[in-house]
Image (cartoon, helix red, strand yellow):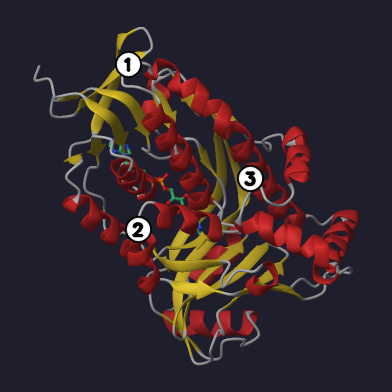
C-alpha cells in the first residue's frame, strides 16, 4: 500500500468546520492534510458568526475577506408570538450596549465555503485529498493513520475529525454518541422584502418554536421557522407566492412584502453529543462532536471554539508527543460543549412548554432581560463572547443537563 508522507495534522471532513480548521492549522505553520471529498450542491443555509468567532477569524487572517460578503447584525429583537395566558414583553438588545459594533455577521454557507476553498487552494502548507477517508487504523498504541478510499494512507502527528454527525473517525475510536429528536421541523429559506431590516434580527417566539429573521443583505434576510410536523407539511405544500403571503402574515408584515429567493430547506430538529471529544491522537470538532437545533446561532460558533483549542494544542505539542492530545482536548472542550448543548435544549423546551410555570419563568426572564441593565449586558456578552458572561449559570445548566427522551447511542 502506498504510504503518504507524515503531516503535523490531518483533518478529515471538508464542511465549514474542516475548512476553517485547515486554514487555522496552516496559519500556525502546521503541515496540514485536508481530506475533503467534493460536496453536493449546498442549500441556501446561512450562518451568523458571532463576535467570539469573528475575533478568531481575524486572528488567522480570514475576517478581512469575509466581512465584505457578510451582513452586520446590530440589534436583536425578541417578540412573543404565542397566544398564551402569560406572554413575554418585547425585548430589544443592541450590540452598542456592550461596546460592540455588531453581535455578529450573517452570510450564506456556500459563499463562505467558496472563499475558504479559494484560500485553501492558495495555501502551500495544505495538501487536499479529494477521496473520502475509509478507515482510521491504529498503527501503534494511541497512534493512528487514516486510510483513504483509493488505498492511500495519511500519517500525521495529530488528527482532527471534522466528518460530521455520523463521523467515521468517532466510531472507529469507539466513542459513542447520544442522539435525540425534538418533535419539530425547521423550514429554512432566504427572503427578499420591501421594508428595511435596519440590521435587526427579529425572533418571534411561537408555541412550536422560534421564527427567526436574520439580515443577509440590503432588503434580504434569512429565515428559520420552527414548526410541528403537521405545520411544516402545511407550509411546505404551498407554492412560493402563497408561502410568501402566509409568512408575511405570521411575521406581522415587519419586513413588508416577501419574496422567497432560495430553495426551502427542511431540517428535523435533533441533537447529538459525543461521550468524549477526543481520544489518543484524535480530536473531534464541529458536528462530529456535537449537534443541536438551529436556535440561537450556536452550532458553527461552538465548532470554531473547538478549532481554536484543537489547533493550539497541535501547535504546542511536539510531533512526538501527540498520543495524549485527544485527552487534553477533551478536558479543554467538555464544559463549553455541554453547557451550550444544555442552553439550546432549555431554550427550545421553554418555548414548547405548555406548563404555566415555565411560561411564567420565560416571561419573567425576558422581562428581567428587557429591564435589568447589568443582567441584560451579562447575557448579551455570554451570547457572543462565551466565558465572559454567566459561567456560573452555565455550570448549573450543565450539571442539570440530561439528554431528552428518545435518545439512543450510535
Ligand atoms: C438550518 C440551520 C441553520 C444554522 N445556522 C447556524 C448559525 O446561524 N450559526 C451557527 O454557528 N451555526 C448554525 N448552524 C449549524 C452549522 O450549520 C453547523 O454547526 C455546521 O455547518 C457544521 O459543520 P461541520 O463541518 O462540523 O459538519 P458538516 O457540515 O456535516 O461537514 C462534515 C463534512 O465531512 C464530510 N465527510 C463525512 N464523512 C467523511 C469521510 N469519511 N471522509 C471525508 N469527509 C467526510 C462530509 O462530506 C461533510 O462535508 C445551522 C444549522 C442548520 C441546520
Gap in angstroms between the C-alphas marked 1 and 3: 33 Å
Q: In this view, does 336 lie to the left or right of 205?
A: left
Residue at the (36%, 65%) spot, across then down: 64
Of the numbered discs 1 and 2, the one sitting upstream in the chain is: 2
- Can you identify the residue that label 1 sits on? 320
Q: Which of 71 and 46 is in front in this view?
A: 71
Give neighbour class at mark 2: few <14, some 14-19, many 20+ (Cα, 10 Å): some
x then y, percent, for residue 296: 61, 58
Of the numbered discs 3 and 2, the one sitting upstream in the chain is: 2
Residue at the (18%, 37%) spot, across then down: 131
Of the numbered discs 1 and 3, the one sitting upstream in the chain is: 1
Give neighbour class at mark 1: few <14, some 14-19, many 20+ (Cα, 10 Å): few
Q: Does residue 410 appear in this view?
A: no
x then y, percent, for residue 19: 32, 48
Residue 332 falls in image quadrant: top right
Does residue 357 lie above or below 131 as drawn? below
- Can you identify the residue that label 2 sits on? 62
* Extreme residue toward the left, this view: 2
x then y, percent, for residue 153: 18, 23
Q: Is residue 240 left or right of residue 235?
A: left
Residue 264 falls in image quadrant: bottom left
- Can you identify the residue that label 3 sits on? 340
Amino acid at each position: 500500500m502506498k504510504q503518504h508522507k507524515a503531516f503535523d495534522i490531518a483533518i478529515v471532513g471538508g464542511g465549514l468546520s474542516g475548512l476553517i480548521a485547515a486554514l487555522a492549522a496552516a496559519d500556525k505553520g502546521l503541515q496540514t492534510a485536508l481530506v475533503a471529498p467534493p460536496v453536493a450542491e449546498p442549500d441556501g443555509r446561512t450562518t451568523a458568526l458571532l463576535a467570539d468567532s469573528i475575533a478568531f477569524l481575524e486572528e488567522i487572517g480570514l475576517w478581512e475577506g469575509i466581512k465584505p460578503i457578510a451582513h452586520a447584525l446590530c440589534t436583536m429583537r425578541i417578540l412573543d408570538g404565542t397566544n398564551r395566558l402569560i406572554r413575554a414583553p418585547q425585548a430589544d438588545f443592541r450590540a452598542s450596549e456592550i461596546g460592540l459594533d455588531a453581535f455578529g455577521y450573517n452570510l450564506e454557507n456556500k459563499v463562505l465555503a467558496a472563499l475558504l476553498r479559494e484560500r485553501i487552494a492558495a495555501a502551500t502548507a495544505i495538501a487536499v485529498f479529494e477521496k473520502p477517508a475509509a478507515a482510521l487504523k491504529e498503527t501503534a498504541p494511541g497512534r493512528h493513520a487514516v486510510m483513504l478510499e483509493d488505498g492511500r494512507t495519511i500519517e500525521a502527528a495529530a488528527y482532527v475529525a471534522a466528518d460530521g454527525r455520523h463521523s467515521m473517525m468517532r466510531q472507529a475510536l469507539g466513542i459513542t454518541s447520544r442522539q435525540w429528536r425534538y418533535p419539530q421541523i425547521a423550514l429554512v429559506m432566504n427572503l427578499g422584502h420591501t421594508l428595511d431590516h435596519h440590521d435587526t434580527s427579529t425572533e418571534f417566539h411561537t408555541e412550536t418554536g422560534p421564527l427567526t429573521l436574520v439580515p443577509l443583505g440590503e432588503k434580504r434576510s434569512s429565515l428559520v421557522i420552527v414548526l410541528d410536523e403537521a405545520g411544516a407539511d402545511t407550509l411546505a405544500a404551498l407554492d412560493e407566492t402563497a408561502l410568501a403571503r402566509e409568512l408575511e402574515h405570521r411575521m406581522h408584515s415587519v419586513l413588508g412584502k416577501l419574496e422567497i429567493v432560495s430553495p426551502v430547506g427542511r431540517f428535523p430538529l435533533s441533537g447529538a453529543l459525543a461521550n468524549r471529544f477526543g481520544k489518543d491522537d484524535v480530536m473531534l470538532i464541529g458536528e462530529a462532536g456535537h449537534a443541536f437545533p438551529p436556535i440561537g446561532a450556536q452550532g458553527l460558533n461552538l465548532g470554531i471554539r473547538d478549532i481554536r483549542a484543537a489547533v493550539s494544542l497541535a501547535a504546542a505539542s511536539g510531533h512526538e508527543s501527540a498520543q495524549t492530545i485527544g485527552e487534553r482536548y477533551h478536558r479543554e472542550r467538555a464544559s463549553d460543549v455541554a453547557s451550550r448543548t444544555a442552553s439550546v435544549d432549555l431554550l427550545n423546551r421553554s418555548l414548547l412548554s405548555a406548563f404555566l410555570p415555565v411560561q411564567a419563568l420565560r416571561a419573567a426572564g425576558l422581562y428581567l432581560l428587557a429591564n435589568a441593565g447589568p443582567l441584560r449586558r451579562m447575557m448579551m456578552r455570554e451570547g457572543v463572547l462565551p466565558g465572559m458572561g454567566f459561567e456560573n449559570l452555565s455550570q448549573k445548566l450543565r450539571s442539570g443537563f440530561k439528554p431528552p427522551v428518545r435518545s439512543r447511542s450510535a
